Image (cartoon, helix red, strand yellow):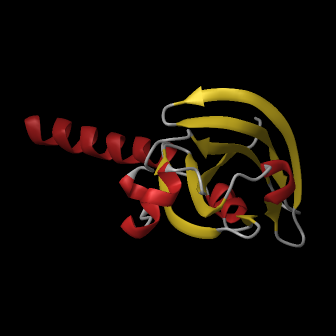
């Protein structure tokens, strides 16, 4: 009697995990965003969102550097440096393709901080990031408005 209950719980939990992962649409949008002149870092998942990191010479205006591939539209509006852990959200908007639309939050690493290790930025770049010579941006791409 206990085995069917455990099996049911495992199946139920497996189904719930899919709801907490980025959808195919979010992954497609994330593949099309970039920060011009910056190098990509490792990506990371945060529930239904995917973070696409970039590092490059800074400081730069994200409104001028964040871009999308041909066939996609980007609509960004400045944000008021909303604190989000080690980051500030500096812009928010949407990425729209022919078949789907996603939300995007542009985050900059707060000055004087080293980036999280999961971004995979080489140690040789860390001093220039902490000094503010290089800048880390993370484009968080998530599901569109429902």
Q: Position of residue 71 (x, y in %)?
A: 90, 70
Q: Quadrant of residue 134?
A: bottom right
70 or 35, nearer to the observer: 35
Above/below status of 31 relative to 9: below
- Quarter of the image with the N terminus in it: top left
89 or 31, nearer to the observer: 89
**Residue at left 84%, top 61%?**
99
**Residue at left 72%, top 37%?**
90
Q: Quadrant of residue 8?
A: top left
Q: In this view, does 93 lie to the left or right of 123?
A: right
Above/below status of 55 relative to 39: above
62 or 7, nearer to the observer: 62
Q: Position of residue 16 (x, y in %)?
A: 42, 41
Q: Where is residue 12 in the image (x, y as percent from the top left)?
A: 35, 40
Q: Is residue 1 visible?
A: no
Q: Is residue 71 visible?
A: yes
**Residue at left 52%, top 66%?**
41
131 or 9, nearer to the observer: 131
């Amino acid at each position: 009697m206990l085995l069917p209950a455990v099996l049911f719980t495992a199946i139920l939990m497996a189904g719930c995990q899919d709801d907490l992962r980025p959808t195919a649409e979010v992954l497609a949008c994330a593949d099309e965003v970039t920060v011009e002149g910056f190098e990509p870092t490792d990506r990371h998942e945060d529930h239904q969102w995917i973070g696409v990191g970039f590092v490059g010479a800074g400081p730069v205006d994200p409104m001028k550097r964040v871009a999308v591939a041909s066939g996609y539209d980007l609509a960004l509006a400045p944000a008021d440096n909303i604190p989000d852990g080690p980051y500030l959200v500096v812009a928010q908007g949407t990425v729209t393709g022919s078949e789907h639309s996603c939300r995007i939050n542009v985050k900059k690493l707060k000055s004087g901080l080293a980036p999280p290790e999961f971004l995979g930025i080489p140690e040789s770049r860390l001093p220039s990031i902490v000094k503010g010579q290089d800048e880390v941006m993370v484009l968080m791409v998530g599901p569109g408005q429902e």
